[in-house]
Amino acid sequence: MSDLKTITETLISGDVEALMSQVKEALEKGTAAGEILANGLIAGMDIVGERMETGEMFIPEVLMSAHAMGEAVEILKPLLAEGETNTAGRVIIGTVKGDLHDIGKNLVSMMLESAGFEVTDLGVDVDADAFMKAIEELNPHIVGLSALLTTTIPAMRDTVDRIVQSGKKDSIKIMVGGAPVNQAFADEIGADAYASDAGSACKLAKAMLR
Amino acid sequence: MYDRMQELNQQDFSRVHESAMDLLKNTGIVFNDDEAIEIFKHNNVKVEGKTVFLTEKDVRAALEKAPATFTVAGRNPDKSVAIGGDDFVFVPGYGAPYIIDAQGEQREAVMEDYDTFCKLIHTSKYIDMNGWMMVEPSDMPPETVHMDMMLSNFLLCDKPCMGSPVSRQGAKDGIEMAAIVFGGKEKIMDQPVSVSLINSLSPLQFSDEMVGSLIELARNGQACVVASLIMAGASGPVTLGGVAALQNAEILAGITLAQMVREGAPVIYGSTSSAMDMKTGALSIGAPALAKNTNVTAQMARFYNLPSRSGGGLTDALYPDGQAGIESALALSTAARSGINFILHSCGILGSYIAMSFEKFLMDEELCGMVRQMLKPIAFDDEGIDVEMIKKTGIGGQYLTNPKTFKLCRTEFFLPDLMTRMNYDAWSAGGKKRIHEVADDKLSQRLAKYEKPDIDPAVEKELTEYVNRRKNA
C-alpha cells in the first residue's frame, strides 16, 4: 500500500524516470498491474485534477504528470486483464474548418488524455467531412469542436448539423469551446456541452460519460 | 539605451544647477533654528538673521562628502537594504490622517490601523522597508505618539524602518530607541538603521522642527531624505523648469547643513513636487507633472552622485478605483524606471495623501511586484535563448510539455495575487469580484496568518520602559 502511495506522490511531482522505476519495482514485488493503475496512478491524476482547479498546480505541471502517467501505463498495458484498461472514453477533437489555431485545442486534448481518455486529434482546419469520416472509423463517445475566430463558428454549426443528419447524435456527446463560443451559442447549435477552459472541459467530459 | 522620458539634457543640468546657486547666493534660504545658524556661521557662511547665503563652494564641498550609496540595517540583518546606485526600495505611504475603508467611508486613523500597516509590511513580499507614520493615530497623545509608532515599528516588523523627524526631541527619542534595539548608539553611528523625511517649507525655508531633527539625525549617523514638495503655481513657480531650480536650491541647502553637522552623513535627494489643480487650488499628485518632476529628481540626483527619493503609488482618487490604478501605476513605474532609489508612498495612499486604504495598499503592493519584475533584466545567454530547443520543437510544435516550461513555470513570470486572469464564466461564477474586493478578501487572510517577529525579551522590555518613562516625564 505504501508503494502505491509513493507512486501517487511521484506522479503528482511529474518525475517520469522515478515513476517508471517505482512502477516496475511494485510489479516485481507482486503488486497487480490493475491495482497500480487504479490505486496508484488514477488516484494520483484525480488529485492532480483537483489541484489544477484550485490553482495549486500549474498547467505545465499537470501536463508533466499526465505524461508520466502515459509512460507508466505503457509498462502496465500488457499486464492488465480484460476490462482493466484506463480508458475513460474515446474522444475525437479538432479545430473547425477555416481556423488554424490550436493551442487551446491541444491543451484540452492533453488534459483529456491525462484524465484517461483515448484522444484522437484531427488537427486544425478540419471540415465536416473529415469529422464524419473519423466518427465512422473510431466510434467516439465525445466529439470536441474548437474555434478561435468568430468567422469560423458557422463551421461549428455545420459540423453539428452533419452529425445530427447522420443519425449518430444519440450515441455521441458534442462539446464546443474557444474564445468566441459561449453556453448560449452551444445551446443554439445543439451541442451537448460548452466549457470555458481546459480544466472544466475535462471535468465535463468525465461527468457526461459517468 | 533610449528612453523618451529624459527631462534634462546636459545643458539643462547646468542651467538648473546655476539657477539654484544664484538663488542660494543672492536670495538666501531661511533656517528657523539657532544651532543651524551657529553651524553655518562656524563654517564661514554669510548669515543675516535666519537667512543663510550659501556659495557654490559651500555646496560643492558638501556634495563631495555625501555618500553615493549606503545601507540601512534592519533588525533582521537579512532584510537590510542598499540605498543608491542601481538599487531601489519600496517604502509604504506616509503621513495620512485618515483611513478610507472598503465602503468608501473616511474616518480618523487610530493606533490599531498603524499596527495593521506594520503587520502588512512585515509580511509583504514586495515592500522592502517599513515606513513611519503610515497614518497619524488620532487616539494617542500627539506629544508622545512618535514613540508609540517607533515602538510598533520595532516590535511588529523586523525590516529596516524610517525614523521620527517630528522635532529635535522626537528625533532624539527615535535615536535612543534604535540604540536600545541595535545595542548602543556607537553601533548605529556608522551604520544607519533609519531614514527620516526632512521637508523644506517652500519657497526657501526650513521649519524649526525639520532643522532640529536633521541636525540630531545627521549627528547620530542616521540617514535623511532632504525633500521639497512644491505646489507648482502656488508655493513655487508654475513652470516645472522653475520648480526644478527652486527645489534644487532647497534640497542642496539641507544637504549642505547635514554635511556640516557630520561629514559623510547619509542623505537622499528628494522631491514630490507637483502641480496645483488650477480649478480647486488643491495639490494634484495624480497629475503628469508629478511623474515629470520625478524624472527630473532622479536625473538631478544622479548629476550630483546622490541617492534619490520620490513618491510611488500616488493618486488623487478617493477610492481604490480605476483612477487610483491609473495614476498610481504611472507614478510608481515612472519612479522605478527613472532610477529613483527610495520610493516612498509606494503603497496605500488615496486622495492626495489625505488617507490610507488597506485595499489600495494591497493593490499597490502587487504593482510594486509587477514593476520590480518589469525591471529584472531578460537573459539573452545560451540558457535564456536556447535556440536548440526552438529548433527541436520545430514548425508548428508546442512548448506546453517542454521540460523547460515545466521547470520554470513557477519562477519565470510574475504570479499575481489580485489580478484577474480568468475568463468571463469563471469570473462571473466567482461573484464578479473587482480588484478592491479581492484585496479586501486577501487582507483578512493575510492578517490572520501574521506572526510577530522574534525579539529579545530584554530588548522589548527596555524599549517599552523607555517609552513609558518618557511619557511620564
Image: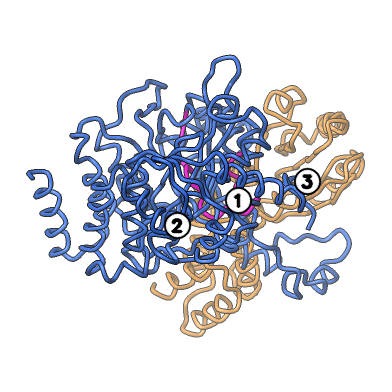
User: Mark number for residue A134?
Assistant: none
- Asked whether A26 or B137 is in front, the reply is B137
Q: Amino acid at mark 3?
A: Arg
Camera-near label (2 vs 3) is 2
Name the residue carrying label 2. B44
Name the residue carrying label 3. B4
Task: Find residue A173 and report its horizontal and vertical position in percent.
Answer: 70, 38
Distance from disc 1 to disc 3, alpha carbons, whole Å, reads: 15 Å
Number of numbered discs visible in the structure rendering: 3
Q: Give the residue at x 61% y 48%.
A: B21
Badge 1: few (under 14), some or many (20 or more) residues near its Cα, within 10 Å? many
Name the residue carrying label 1. B336
Chain containing mark 3: B
Discs 1 and 3 carry the same chain letter: yes
Q: Secondary structure at mark 2?
A: loop
The disc, 2 or 3, on the residue closer to the chain's N-terminal end is 3
What chain is colored blue?
B
